[in-house]
Image (tube, grey):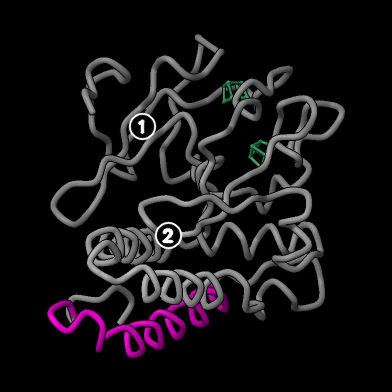
Amino acid sequence: MDLSEISDGKLYEIDDLCRLGCSDCAGCSSCCHDTEGLMLDPLDVARIMKAAGKDFMSLIERELELVMVDEMLLPKMKMDARNACCFLDRNGRCSIHPLRPGICRLFPLGRYYENDDYRYFLQTLECRKHDRYKLRIRDWLDEKDAEGYHDYVMSWHRFLKLMEKKLPLLTDESRSSVTSYILKMFFLAPYHSAEAPGPDFDTEDFYTEYYSRMFRVRETLSPLFPDSAAPYPGS
Ligand code: SF4
Ligand code: SF4
């Protein structure tokens, strides 16, 4: 990726100021349309389950769809008849705003992964508003535990990268069963944080469950990938 073509050429840390402020996107919902590439991770899906009050299979009927990416079956947002995200309401506002996916919290920032970590870059061609004011990235992300979120993002990223490398080495049959197992472990099996009563989503509770699942997945897949027992994310 040539950052100079799509960004201001800088890489930002979480406590840096960046031109992100857009007055709550007032009157604009441009980036909630044509979101074909909006892939979701387990935290996104758990939050959406909580916001919509639906389990994963019910969401797949309308709001989400499964796509094959690098040999893995992963969920993404589905577009509706308006070619907009299913959670965009008639007033052009996000109906699940407090529990929106990470990529929606991030936009128009992107993550630049390097040296087993990431920094942020500002996409300068994406947002329609041109008079954006400076805000601290930490505040923009709207994550109470920004460090915990960073560790979680890296954990999932490392896992995807590892699977991208290893899955093509398996037979079709093994790959298919590993893919189904990953889907079941991280998305289909209900999360307590998504099903707990009340409107609040307990992110700490989610992380505990996610890392426990990651540990089990590691244990289960280790015989298939004996040379990659470490460093496995989340263990
Ligand atoms: S979840 Fe909300 S912010 Fe994200 S694309 Fe859908 S409507 Fe927009
Ligand atoms: S294009 Fe910019 S102003 Fe419009 S909804 Fe997206 S982030 Fe907000």
Left or right: 73 with respect to 15?
A: right
Nearest the eye: 53 or 128: 53
Q: Mark 2, mark 1: which one is toward the viewer?
A: 2
Q: Given the image, on which type of amino acid does mark 2 rest?
A: Met
Figure quadrant of the N terminus: top left
Q: Given the image, on which type of amino acid does mark 1 rest?
A: Leu
- In primary-sequence order, the first of circles 2 and 1 is 1
Disc 1: which residue: 17
Q: Quadrant of residue 214?
A: bottom left
Nearest the eye: 208 or 136: 208
Q: Secondary structure at mark 1?
A: strand
What secondary structure do most residues of the magenta stretch adopt?
helix
Q: Which mark is residue 102?
A: none
**Structural crowding at the residue carrying mark 1, measured as other residues with C-alpha within 10 Å and reported as few (<14), some (14–19) or many (≥20):** some
Badge 2 residue CB within 8 Å of ligand 1? no
Q: Residue furthest right?
A: 90
Q: Position of residue 62 (x, y in %)?
A: 78, 49
| Magenta span of residues | 204-228
Nearest the eye: 49 or 137: 49
Q: Please determine whether, in this image, residue 106 is positioned above or below residue 108.
A: below
Disc 2: which residue: 72
Q: CA distance from mark 2 to mark 1?
A: 36 Å
